[in-house]
Amino acid sequence: MSGPLTGWRVLDLAETQQGLLAAKLLAEMGADVVKVERAGEERRGAPVDLEESAPSSWEIAFDAGKRSIAIDPGSARATDLVLDLVRRADVVVAPLGLGLLSELGLDKERLRAEAPRAVLAVTSPYGALGPLAGAPGADITAQALGGVMWKTGDPDDPPMPAGVALAEGVGALYLLIGTLAAAIGAEREGRGRRVDVSLYGSQIGMQSWEIDSEWLLGRVTERLAVGHPDVSDRRICHAFETAEGWLQLAGVLRARWPQLCEMIGEPEMSERWSDEAAQAEHIDEIIATFGENLRRRPVADWLEEIERRDILGVRVQDDADIASDPQARENGYVVEMEHPQRGAVSVAGSPFIYDREPRMALAPPPVPGADADALLREIGYTPGAISALRAEGVVA
Amino acid sequence: MTGPLDGIRVVDFTIAQQGPHATKLLADMGAEVIKIERRQGRTGGGEPWMRGFVLAHNRNKRAISLDLKHPEGNEIARRLAATADVVASNFRQGVMEKLGLGFEDLRRANPRVVVVQGSGWGPLGPRVTEGAVDMVGHARGGLMWRTGFEGRGPMTVGCAVTDQVGALVLGAALLGALARAARTGHGEKVDTSLYGGQVALQAWEFAERSLRGGGAQPRAGTGHPLIKGRGVWQAFEASDGWLAIGCTDPSRLGALCEVAGVEPAAAGSPAEAIAAVVAGLAGRLRGRPAAEWVELLRAAGIAAAPVQRYGDIRRDEQARANGYLLEMDHPEYGEITVAGMPITFDLEPMARATPPPSFGEHTERYLEELGYGWDEITRLRDESVC
């Protein structure tokens, strides 16, 4: 099983979901990702799981496919060991302030000197510059600063976060893009770059359209529990409850307006409000009419009607729907991972399909320190040297 | 300042948001992105309310207009693609192949080319030819049912999150292939979709469900489904607005209570203790302005932030300092502020950008580069080929 980054080496010293997920996605592309962790410390962010000795959902989601070496940062020789790993890395992922690296007495100048071609990918809540550069942050505070909490929910609801750690996830994806671009630059120019991506910045970038629209047009849109604030006040782009399940319609293609009206048994509505201005003016009435009619039959029936008309509409799915969806399975978006305690479990797979071959599941997350011997041998340590490092407690 | 993708040429056939936002990021990082515009116009091109859409997804790009179905227009596209490092598209499956612009065609002329294809649902499976837009990806991808309250209907995240995540996945996928091409000289094809991006984004929640053996899916409500009972993680109303607090470290709960003047729970399970703290905070935090609480909490090492609206972001020094906002001198709108670049290289934020090209602005320049003479270009214009 080979991805495009086969042969690339990533050193993962991330401490938050943002960096851990970015490194895992590099593993999905085939990179050899080595996690350096503190010996004896519980993995940060990993919640208590159902069985203490088994990998948690956090580790499965963010550490799968990696190798691990666990070190005691208090020991003098740990710094040399980590430098040996840094020198052969194409990418080093670390938090702002550099976390474990800083405990080892390493700063960004030293890293640059030791590994001039490596990309240094740095995570942070709010950015490396500015008054909040060192401030404590979390996914939810970045969603708050980034405006998306204010935009999510009904006007009467409190500010609502997305149902996932959105700032961490989107922050991971921007970091991945910046890291890969810098890695390509390093191949071409022979020098690595430092890449900074924060959770806050990721939220602003994610809303480029909505933000640019508001600032350019001076139009502050309402919060909407269903639909998009810039679209759903003029077009049918809403979720509707049916006799069984929820249906999301996306009537963004204006050419399909007559078919939409005909489908719900209101063909005259398409002529009554045939142009967009009229539809925008009467959108509340239109939504109510769609709601009344769609409630009469189950979503499965509507999906058949939709297919016949080439309208855009889907079932609002939950996890169970996705886990059993052949579309998700055939593309490898859901795959089976061999869990050491539970056997095969369904997990999210790679979103990247190279040469039309969906990836199999990554290896389960490593036990901390599991790959120390193999790694040390790879970087040229003799069996005797490895035993000595273990005896001194440098490596757990 | 040079970008890491300086010298990389991207021939960009993408439409809507998933593709154009990805290629905008490439342009922001130094790539030469040539937007191929169909003669019938660009997404949102003619509608005043969509001006922000065009602005957000097309800066720093070049544009040429072409009728891809006209034999001569098609030939121009194929000749241009032969000069590309990357060819990107997100038409429905099969369209690029029909145009003679499929991976196999492109590779024959250009073995190092990376071809990326975005779609709604992926290159395989029963839904391979179905169309998609952000909102149906959002619904089918599961995030709409995770967001919102137990006992209520689905809730959408308040932005086109599915297209954006789809754009990021598409951008990352092609860069992965481009990294290999930089080492080996060989291109390849990569497929991504809105659906795949959504599932990957929910890896944690999905793994948790599998480990628990299914069961009813929890809704996020005002926090996060997997943090519920394990920490303080939500927005609270202050005297003049809202602030969010994220505290999952049990050793910091005491500090949080002390700052807010809340009595920590003496007995009960950890989840009960959290619930008591949250109730106490909800009462106490109403008593002072959000900014004061945020400052006090940050000083105590607790993650806290005001719930900002876009207008607040525009005035935020932190956003400005990191290049998350930038200025643009737009020929039509003048000097404007837009959402900036979230990726910073070597601590030098991007401060300015070139506005989106006008429709087909660089057509003549690229035709000249391909060796077309002025008479020929004029004829192609007159015949609406370009």
Image (cartoon, helix red, strand yellow):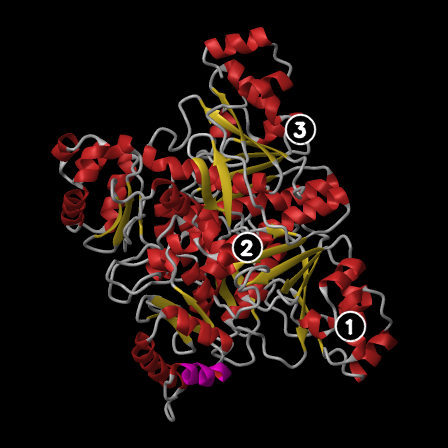
Q: Is residue A55 left or right of residue A86?
A: left
How many residues crowd mark 3 within 10 Å: few (<14), some (14–19), many (20+)? some
Which residues are drawn in magenta?
Answer: B251-259
Residue at x-position 72% and y-position 79% = A72
Q: Is residue A378 left or right of residue B262?
A: right
In the image, is residue A207 part of the stretch drawn in magenta? no
Of circles 3 and 1, which is in front? 1
Q: Is residue A326 left or right of residue B99?
A: left
Q: Main secondary structure of the magenta part?
A: helix
Residue at x-position 51% and y-position 60% = A199
Q: Nearer the viewer, residue B362 or A18?
A: B362
> Between marks 2 and 1, how big is the CA–CA gap?
33 Å
Residue at x-position 26% and y-position 48% = A238
In the image, is residue B253 part of the stretch drawn in magenta? yes
Identified by mark 3, the residue type is Asn
Q: Position of residue B276 (x, y in %)?
A: 34, 84
Q: Position of residue B380 (x, y in %)?
A: 51, 11
Q: Quadrant of residue A123?
A: bottom right
Residue at x-position 45% and y-position 76% = B296
Question: Which type of secondary structure does the marked residue at label 1 adopt?
Answer: helix
Identified by mark 1, the residue type is Thr
What residue does disc 3 label? B110
What residue does disc 1 label? A79
Q: Nearer the viewer, residue A39 or B386?
A: B386
Identified by mark 2, the residue type is Ala
Q: Are discs 2 and 3 both within one chain?
A: yes
Of circles 2 and 1, which is in front? 2
Q: Quadrant of residue A16?
A: bottom right
Residue B321 numbered tag? 2
